[in-house]
Amino acid sequence: MPDVIATLSTVSSSQSSVQLQKLWHPLWFALISALGMTLLLNGPFLSSIQAKVPGQFKLQLCLILLLFLLNFLLAVLVSFSRIQKPVMLLLFVAGAVSYYFITSFGIVIDTSMLQNAMETDTAEARGLLSLSMLWTVSTVMLFPLLCSSLIKVRVMPLKKFLWHWLLCLVLIFAALFSVAACAYSELAPFFRNFRDVKHLALPVSPVSAAVSFSGSWLKSRFPESFIESGTDAVQPVTAKTAKPRLIVLVLGETARADHFQLNGYPRATNPALSVLPVYSFTDVSSCGTATAHSVPCMFSVMRRDQYVESVAKNTSNVLDILQRTGINIRWFDNNSGCKTVCDRVPSEFLFNDSSNPLCEDGQCKDEILLQALETELNKTSAQDRLIVLHQLGSHGPEYFKRSASSQKHFLPECTNKQLQLCQQEDIINAYDNSIVATDELLSRVIQQLQGEQDYQTAMLYLSDHGESLGENGVYLHGLPYWMAPEAQTKVPMLWWMSDAYARVQQLNAECIAQRTKQKLSHDNLFHSLLGLFQISSKVHQRQLDLFQPCND
């Protein structure tokens, strides 16, 4: 009997030994994961470096090695037993989704793009989902799912694991330093000349963007204090008029300047506005390339080159200042929200009205803004008024949904949310039809204002950013400003005023017409709005007030 027990004990010990041999060290699993991420997710990165430095094999090899070491570093940092596999799967998902958008739309993954994604609404997000995206993510995820299910990772004593973990980190940093030092003369000019390449490194780029975005988000949500700007602002008694002023500010979405007929575009995208006395400013730059950045920036006192989101969102914007001086402010939103700009003024989010026949699947036709405007204009007020209408405009990729059948002047349209599968001409047709829809909206706003007898009326239209329509393989918007094409940064701006408003403001029409060719930007909005209501304040910079030189 003792022999049997001894034999069984030996067999059990042998089985345990074999089982132990099948268990992987967590750092080996991290190494395999890093190899998988580098090889499966970085086709665009490899293609980019081959195109930018063809034939420079040493530099290409160093860049690939740097990418692998960074992915290995990322994998090692999360290699603790309880979180290693779940976090690794999340990294692959983030990389796979980023890979799909990079290869399909030509975008890059940076902080502003991630912010744009985080602040979008359900309807907009749904417009980007497709079977192609599901297929891409599913095929990429086969490798990490198989690895996670087949590879058994050893649970090590914490003290022993920490020694191995720290040693591995030291070796990785030593390797990174060695590669950088050996090829510094080639790497330094490469990263200086081709800054966009780093945004193609997966999953390092989305992780870096997430860390940066989290820091900015925390600063904006938990500020040290709210900064009151323009506390000295007043509307002098001499600025009061017999009839109150009424200005409608239409905040456009994704409209690019070079697709407006009023700016010389050969297509008739502005059939209604072309016969109205509007002023079109042809050289206007946006503050950013995405709504989440541009909208807070354009209403902020900070200029684009000074803009800090966490500060701007916790500082009085131009709407706050106008309201403090007695201007009646109303914000009507048919987009994904006002990005904190309207937080302290009366606002209404129209896209939440599921009962309205103009709304479907969480999005509404911009005609709903006309309904809101008509209702608002029926209210009487002795105060000067500013009404903001925030459009859905030309938001992609489903441009064809932004126009009614009567507005589809250019056919055939691209009706596929995967724009890369459409002919570029069809994409442009759908986009131009959305501009026709905006043209009709603006002309109807003007018609409503022309009928107002109790106010001196005017309308200002300004888009938040532009849009790429497949030029050089780039679609949509959100590229870093320094590398974005003018299609994303040049925006239309229009001005209309009634004769009564022109008289009371003493605005010279000929002077305004001459200024339509001058270089302007979103930086002008803050100061121009103050000037239009004749607000006196130290924050009002006259040189940035678009209309100041035209006051007779």
Image (cartoon, grey):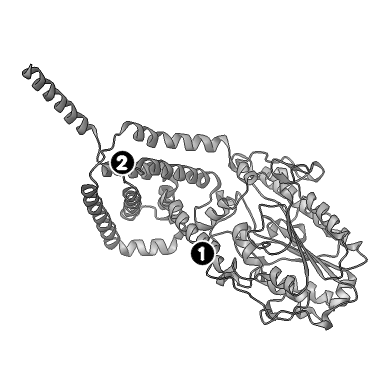
Quick one: 502 or 423, which is closer to the camera? 502
Q: Residue furthest top?
A: 1
Q: Is residue 397 above or below residue 153?
A: below
Which residue type carries mark 1? Lys
Judge from the rendering whether residue 394 lies leftward or rightward of residue 375; answer left or right. Answer: left
First-in-chain label (2 vs 1): 2
Q: How far across and down, in percent of the image, does residue 470 sit?
A: 60, 48
Residue 347 shows up from this direction: yes
Pair 2/1: label in front: 1
Q: Residue furthest left?
A: 3
Q: Is residue 276 above or below residue 104?
A: below
Residue underneath mark 2: 32
Q: Residue at x 79, y 41 (%)?
A: 357
Q: How far across and down, in percent of the image, does residue 311 sit?
A: 56, 69
Quick one: 191 or 25, which is closer to the camera? 25
Which residue type carries mark 2? Ile
- Circle 1: element type: helix
Residue underneath mark 1: 219
Badge 2 crowding class, 10 Å Cα cut-off, few under 14, some 14 to 19, many 20 or more, is: some
Q: Residue at x 26, y 40 (%)?
A: 155
- Circle 2: element type: helix
For the residues labelled 2 and 1, the Cα–Cα distance comes to 37 Å
Quadrant of the rendering where the N terminus is positioned: top left
Quadrant of the rendering where the C terminus is positioned: bottom right
Quick one: 194 or 41, which is closer to the camera? 41
Q: How far across and down, in percent of the image, does residue 277 sit?
A: 85, 65
Q: Residue at x 10, y 20 (%)?
A: 5
Q: Residue furthest front?
A: 1
Q: Residue at x 88, y 64 (%)?
A: 380
